[in-house]
Image (tube, rainbow, N blue to C red):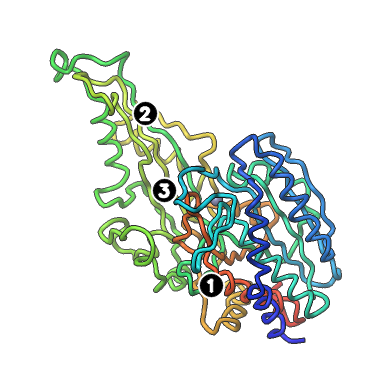
C-alpha cells in the first residue's frame, strides 16, 4: 500500500484499455451545449455517465437544474470522510462546442473515438472529457489502494461551459455551503509542452466592445463629395492608432497593469512560449521591454477583432456614413475592470474623438484571476508532480485565455490550482480535436500521485 501502488493502478487502468473504452463512452454523448436539440444528451451525460460512477465510490450526488434558461443541468457531489480532514473541490464540464460535422478529416467522426497512433480523436476529448475522466480515475485508484482517500472531495460538473458557464455563479452562490473547500484542483486547457506537466492558477480577463463613428445618414458619391465630407473610417483608424503604438504597445495608462511582480516574472522566466505548435511568434510585436512569456501571461493586450466601413465585399465610389471596429482588451489582475471603458472614454475624448461611441458587448466580459506563484498550495502541487515525473512542471500564474475561474476565487474564496491534461496542438474548438495517449497516461500518474499525497496525512497548506 504505497504511493507507487496507486500509480501502478492507473498504469494498469490505462494499459489494460479501460481508459480508452471509458473515454469512448463519454465521447459518444453528443453534448453540444450551443445546440438546443442536444438538451437530452446534456442530462444523460450527468445521469448515465457520471452519477452512477461517482455514487459507486461513495459520492452523494444531486442534479441541479440551471437557474439560467440558457444553461444545462449541473451535478454537485460530495464525498465526506471526516470533518477534520482537508477538502478538495474539483470541477469539469461535460458539454462540448458544436460538432462541426462534415468538417472533420476523412475517417473521423465527432462523436466516435478514433485511435490513430498516439492520438485519440473525438469532439470533447481534450475539452473537457478526458480531463475530468483522468481526475476521477485517479481518485478511484487512490481509493482502491488506500481504502480511503484521506481527504474529502466536492465535485461540480457543469454542462454549459461553452455557452459562458451560464448559471454557474448563481448555483455557487445558492450552494456555497456545500462547496466549501481548502483548494480547487481541476483540469482544463493545454500544457505548454506535451511532455512536461503545466500548472496554472487563474486566467486573463477579457472585455469586448464596439467603437463606432457615425457622421451622417447614408453614403455620398466620393467624386462629388470627396474633400468635403469627413471619412469615418480614417477617423476611426486614427483613434485606434492612439490606443496602441505601431507595435501594439498600449498607450492608455490605466490599461497598463501594475502586477508584474518579481515572483510572477520569475515564474514566467524561461517558459516555452515560442516554438512548438501554432504560428511563429512576432518578436517585434507587443511590449518591447518584456519577454514573450511576460507579454502573454503577465501583461494586457489590445486587439481589433473585426472592422468595417462601407461594404468590403462590394465597394462603391462613396464616402461611408459610418465605421465600426469590434475591439478587445485581454487583461491580467492589476487592471481595474470597472475602469476599462471609462479610461478609454477619457483617452478618446482627450485626443479629440468625442464622437466615437463605445458600446460594451453583453456577453463579452471575463474577470481576471491569479494566485501568487509562491502560494503554499502551488508549492504542494508542483512538488508532488516533480516527485511523480522527476522534473518540475511549468508554472503559469494565469492562463492567457479565459476560464470561469472567478466563480471559484470570488464566490467560493478558494485558492485555485489547475493541472491541464491537453496540449496546444489538440485542435480544441476545431475539427479533428484529439488528445495524446502518452500525455493522458502521464496525467493519470500525476493526478494519482497528487491525490495520494493530499491524503497522506502530512502537513497541508491551510
Ligand atoms: Zn472549450
Residue plotted at (47% across, 72% down): 267
47 to 450, vertically: above or below:
above
> In the rendered image, which quarter is residue 2 located in?
bottom right
CA–CA distance in space, label 3 to label 2: 22 Å
Residue plotted at (71% across, 65% down): 136
**First of labels 2, 1 by sequence position:** 2
247 to 316, vertically: above or below:
below
Q: Residues within 10 Å of mark 2 (few under 14, many from 20)?
A: many
Ligand 1 has an atom within 8 Å of the beta carbon of the residue at disc 2? no
Q: Which residue is mark 3?
A: 254
Secondary structure under badge 2?
A: strand
Secondary structure under badge 3?
A: helix
**First of labels 3, 1 by sequence position:** 3
- Which of these two is toward me, 130 or 174? 130
Q: Position of residue 110 (x, y in %)?
A: 55, 49
Tell me, for residue 212, which label it has, or none.
2
Callout in the foreground (3, 1) = 1
Res. 396 in view: no
CA–CA distance in space, label 2 to label 1: 49 Å
Q: Residues within 10 Å of mark 3 (few under 14, many from 20)?
A: some
Q: Are marks 3 and 2 in contact (CB under 8 Å)?
A: no
Q: Which residue is mark 1?
A: 438
- Which of these two is toward me, 361 or 308? 308
Amino acid at each position: 500500500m504505497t504511493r507507487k501502488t496507486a500509480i501502478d493502478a492507473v498504469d494498469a487502468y490505462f494499459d489494460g484499455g479501460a481508459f480508452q473504452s471509458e473515454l469512448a463512452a463519454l465521447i459518444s454523448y453528443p453534448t453540444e451545449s450551443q445546440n438546443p436539440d442536444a438538451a437530452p444528451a446534456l442530462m444523460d451525460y450527468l445521469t448515465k455517465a457520471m452519477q452512477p460512477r461517482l455514487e459507486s465510490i461513495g459520492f452523494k450526488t444531486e442534479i441541479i437544474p440551471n437557474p439560467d434558461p440558457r444553461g444545462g443541468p449541473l451535478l454537485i457531489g460530495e464525498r465526506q470522510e471526516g470533518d477534520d480532514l482537508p477538502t478538495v473541490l474539483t470541477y469539469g464540464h461535460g458539454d462540448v462546442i458544436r460538432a462541426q460535422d462534415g468538417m472533420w478529416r476523412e475517417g473521423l467522426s465527432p462523436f466516435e473515438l478514433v485511435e490513430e497512433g498516439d492520438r485519440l480523436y473525438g469532439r470533447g476529448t481534450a475539452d473537457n472529457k478526458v480531463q475530468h475522466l483522468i481526475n476521477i480515475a485517479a481518485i478511484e485508484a487512490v481509493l482502491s489502494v488506500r481504502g480511503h482517500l484521506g481527504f474529502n472531495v466536492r465535485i461540480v460538473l457543469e454542462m454549459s461551459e461553452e455557452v459562458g458557464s451560464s448559471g454557474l455563479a448563481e448555483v455557487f452562490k445558492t450552494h456555497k455551503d456545500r462547496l466549501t473547500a481548502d483548494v480547487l484542483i481541476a483540469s482544463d486547457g493545454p500544457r505548454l509542452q506535451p511532455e512536461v506537466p503545466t500548472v496554472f492558477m487563474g486566467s486573463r480577463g477579457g472585455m469586448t466592445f464596439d467603437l463606432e463613428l457615425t457622421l451622417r445618414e447614408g453614403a455620398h458619391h466620393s467624386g462629388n463629395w470627396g474633400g468635403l465630407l469627413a471619412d469615418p473610417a480614417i477617423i476611426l483608424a486614427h483613434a485606434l492608432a492612439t490606443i496602441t503604438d505601431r507595435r501594439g504597445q498600449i498607450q492608455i495608462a490605466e490599461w497598463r497593469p501594475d502586477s508584474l511582480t518579481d515572483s510572477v516574472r520569475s515564474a514566467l522566466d524561461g517558459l516555452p512560449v515560442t516554438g512548438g505548435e501554432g504560428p511563429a511568434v512576432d518578436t517585434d510585436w507587443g511590449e518591447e521591454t518584456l519577454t514573450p512569456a511576460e507579454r502573454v501571461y503577465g501583461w494586457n493586450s489590445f486587439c481589433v477583432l473585426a472592422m468595417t466601413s462601407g461594404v468590403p465585399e462590394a465597394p462603391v465610389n462613396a464616402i461611408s456614413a459610418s465605421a465600426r471596429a469590434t475591439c478587445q482588451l485581454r487583461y491580467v489582475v492589476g487592471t481595474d475592470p470597472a475602469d476599462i471603458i471609462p479610461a478609454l472614454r477619457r483617452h478618446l475624448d482627450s485626443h479629440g474623438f468625442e464622437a466615437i461611441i463605445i458600446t460594451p458587448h453583453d456577453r463579452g466580459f471575463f474577470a481576471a484571476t491569479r494566485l501568487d506563484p509562491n502560494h503554499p498550495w502551488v508549492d504542494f502541487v508542483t512538488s508532488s508532480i516533480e516527485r511523480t515525473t522527476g522534473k518540475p512542471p511549468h508554472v503559469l500564474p494565469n492562463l492567457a485565455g479565459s476560464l470561469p475561474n472567478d466563480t471559484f476565487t470570488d464566490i467560493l474564496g478558494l485558492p485555485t490550482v489547475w493541472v491541464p491534461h491537453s496540449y496546444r496542438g489538440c485542435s480544441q474548438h476545431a475539427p479533428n480535436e484529439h488528445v495524446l495517449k502518452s500525455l493522458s497516461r502521464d496525467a493519470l500518474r500525476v493526478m494519482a500521485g497528487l491525490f495520494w499525497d493530499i491524503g497522506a496525512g502530512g502537513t497541508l497548506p491551510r
